[in-house]
Amino acid sequence: MSLGLRGATAFAPATVANVAVGFDILGFAVEAAGDRVRVTRAKEPSVTILEITDDAGAPFGPGIPLDPSRNTATVGLSALLEERRLDFGFEVSISKGIALGSGLGGSAASAVAALVAANALLERPLAAEDLMPFALLGEQAASGAIHPDNVAPCLLGGLTLVTSLSPFRCVRLPVPREILTVLVHPRLRVDTRGARRLLRAEVPLADLVKQTASLAGFVAGCYTDDLELIRQSLRDHVVEPQRATLIPAFAEVKAAALAEGALGASISGSGPTVFAWVASPEAAERVRHSMLRAFMEHGGAEADSWVSPVSEHGARVLNEE
Amino acid sequence: MSLGLRGATAFAPATVANVAVGFDILGFAVEAAGDRVRVTRAKEPSVTILEITDDAGAPFGPGIPLDPSRNTATVGLSALLEERRLDFGFEVSISKGIALGSGLGGSAASAVAALVAANALLERPLAAEDLMPFALLGEQAASGAIHPDNVAPCLLGGLTLVTSLSPFRCVRLPVPREILTVLVHPRLRVDTRGARRLLRAEVPLADLVKQTASLAGFVAGCYTDDLELIRQSLRDHVVEPQRATLIPAFAEVKAAALAEGALGASISGSGPTVFAWVASPEAAERVRHSMLRAFMEHGGAEADSWVSPVSEHGARVLNEE
């Protein structure tokens, strides 16, 4: 029961979508970064954005619309207002911990954090999964397409496979306990809409066969704790080859990760962040350094980097007022 | 050690390939029928076909080449002869228990049974998996394409996912113990090469997303014994819609299966056999009858039918001489 709450703040984690084998259906949450959204009750049943800051509280640069009908964090809130016929509104303050256009699911995180915070203010809060349709509306505002592979793990945590959009259904896949993710984000920005437009509308049937073999092998490897099968399977035959050119030195960065023992490496979401899966903390450090070096030497790009397990935890309320 | 063996007879089971979600990568063995091949030693290092009969021993009608360089059962044997530099040859008698062009993996079964029988005659027999490359040559002779989704379960049994062709790698997926397969084979013949040529060379990206979601959901459902997830996932968005028109009354037969509680129904291999998965013997009988009736009423076709679990057993030697 949340009657009387004036406001709530929620955190939503960064996520890696696509995961080489699961374009638009697979993603996982990481402990690398996240967005924080504070939502307070307003008298009028409408949605207002009060401020957008970085995670140190400084005003966020341009690039995110303040118009609530176009902002990923507020589109879902407006739909929630309408569907629940609420007689109050929301004022929203967004703290972006995830760099814009990094490929780490920043728009999904803002949408999800806003919804989780707002949900805490409802007299009868929705179950987390029931927030999905609203979060997807926000994601659609950001990327122009409905794709759930960031939103689902951001909301629910873990390595999440979306098996159906409507009705929304997903499955949490097990992750072998040794697995760590290395994330390297070169300080470049990729436009998500552009990265999506770049994809060919058709895929050769032979590539579909390879991609499905990799996907099924990856899922089987996760269920059976078979790291060797995961290593053989964590390969993207469809999307990575088309998007790799958007990221300077991608081939060298990926090769550097594999040379240091990564099970696989590919583009996080639409990039430019590159992720790698490794099977030990030592490998994680070696892989992280080799990827950073490759970005610098071959791409001339400084980069931020993280090492994180796949996070069991999705978005959550941090505090209530 | 098989020194001194004069001959051996092997059985290889019928198989269901594609399984709706795994075009060219997934198949399973059934106990419905199979091919039997007797291989005896010949003095000269060459391969000869002595006879081809049906499983009652009557001469097999036209349609299978007697030329060993074109027959699916002997192409692999010739390659085996050459690679192992054998100083003797093989005489082959083929007993076809699987109807030609039925979509039940008859060419794979002949190729596999011949290899398993011949392998028993070698001084140092190969491991079953190492027979795969030879069996694939036979399959290529039959269909014009290398596709392992019949050969792998035929040789190894079970529900088999091929994750890589070269090097050959496969994974046995678990099957929930309730699962039974209903097979209905209308007395029509589909030309496998033709069925393959009919497929578009390109697949819409949106269909790839749906197909991968179904495949991954199906694999997850098998690992977690989740019949409801299997029911939601056992759907072909890519190949079945293109091949359905080759089979008279396919839509009605599939609808009849689903109406009687089948978890899913689709084309076995390139058809015209239609398979359904069900979760009880009672459902199997209901589904079988409804599919037979639909074939008769809407397609005007008599049909043979079987109910079988997914067979754990692949090809095996029946006797040695």
Image: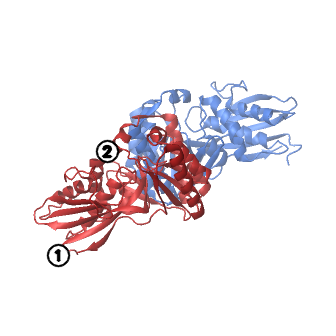
Chain colours: A red, B blue
Q: Quadrant of residue B76?
A: top right
Q: Nearer the viewer, residue B135 or B261?
A: B135
Mark 2: which amino acid?
A: Ala
Q: Quadrant of the C terminus of chain B?
A: top right
**Quick check: B45 left or right of B49?**
right
**Which is more toward the observer, B81 or A16?**
A16
Which amino acid, by three-letter code, is at mark 1?
Gly
The residue carrying pointer 2 sits among few (fewer than 14), some (14 to 19) or many (20 or more) residues within 10 Å by Cα, namely some
Q: Nearer the viewer, residue A53 or B188?
A: A53
Chain ID at mark 1: A
Q: For residue B252, say whether it is visible.
A: no
Say few, some or many: other residues with alpha carbon within 10 Å of mark 1 (under 14 / 14 to 19 / 20 or more).
few
Residue on which the image places disc 1: A4
- In space, the residues marked 2 and 1 are separated at their CA atoms by 37 Å
User: Quick check: do tags 2 and 1 share a chain?
Assistant: yes
Quarter of the rendering containing residue A42: bottom left
On the rendered structure, is B295 left or right of B131? left
